[in-house]
Amino acid sequence: MNLGAFGVLMLLNQRGKGDYSFDSLRGMGTVHPLLGLTMTVFMLSLIGIPPTAGFFGKLYLFSAALNEGHLTLVIIGLLNSAVAAFYYLKVISTMFMAKPEGDVAISQPMGYKAALAISSILIVVIGLFPDQLVTAMLKAVP
């Protein structure tokens, strides 16, 4: 999720400004739909929205902490997730609801686009079928 999000940001930085501000995301979801869609998947997964891998990651993490009696830690984690969600949703809204400014042309190599698309698809597939991944991981551990 993080690598994918930073991958999208690296493509956006190709315009030569060298900044990674919210303004560089303005309108990118409508001008470059693949970048907008993949970034949206990455952000929703970082928030922990189902059916993404991030949801089940947070679910398993918070469940394990709760089962071990770390209620305070779970509450802090949930509050941190809520604060982070505000920032991740701001990225999505800036990409799709703000009008782009200046030069919005971005060189998008096919390999780079394929890597971003495959990453976002895997995040959703893992979110839809987490049990198969957990079962495979448990079989791999002796």
Image (cartoon, rainbow, N blue to C red):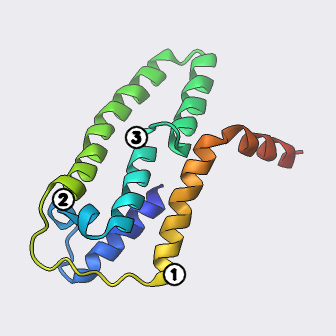
Mark closest to the chain's N terminus, 1 or 2: 2
- Amino acid type, label 2: Phe
Checking the image for residue 94, the label placed there is none
93 w.r.t. 36: above or below: above
Residue 40, given in percent of the width and then of the height, sits at 37, 53
Does dot 3 land on a helix, a strand or a loop? helix
Mark in the foreground, 1 or 3: 1
> What's the CA distance linking mark 1 and mark 3?
27 Å
Residue assigned mark 3 = 47
Residue 58, given in percent of the width and then of the height, sits at 52, 35
Residue 125, given in percent of the width and then of the height, sits at 61, 49
65 w.r.t. 55: above or below: above
> What's the CA distance linking mark 3 and mark 2?
18 Å
Most foreground residue, 70 or 20: 20
Mark in the foreground, 1 or 2: 1
Residue assigned mark 2 = 22
Residue sitting at x 33%, y 31%: 82
Residue sitting at x 44%, y 37%: 49
In the image, taking residue 75 as reference, residue 100 lies left or right, namely left
Q: Label 1 crowding class (10 Å Cα cut-off): few <14, some 14-19, many 20+?
A: few
- Amino acid type, label 3: Ile
The quarter of the picture where residue 139 lies is top right
The quarter of the picture where residue 106 lies is bottom left
In the image, taking residue 73 as reference, residue 105 lies left or right, namely left
Residue assigned mark 1 = 111
Q: Label 3 crowding class (10 Å Cα cut-off): few <14, some 14-19, many 20+?
A: many
Q: Are marks 3 and 2 in contact (CB under 8 Å)?
A: no
- Amino acid type, label 1: Gly
Residue sitting at x 46%, y 75%: 113
The quarter of the picture where residue 95 lies is bottom left
110 w.r.t. 128: above or below: below
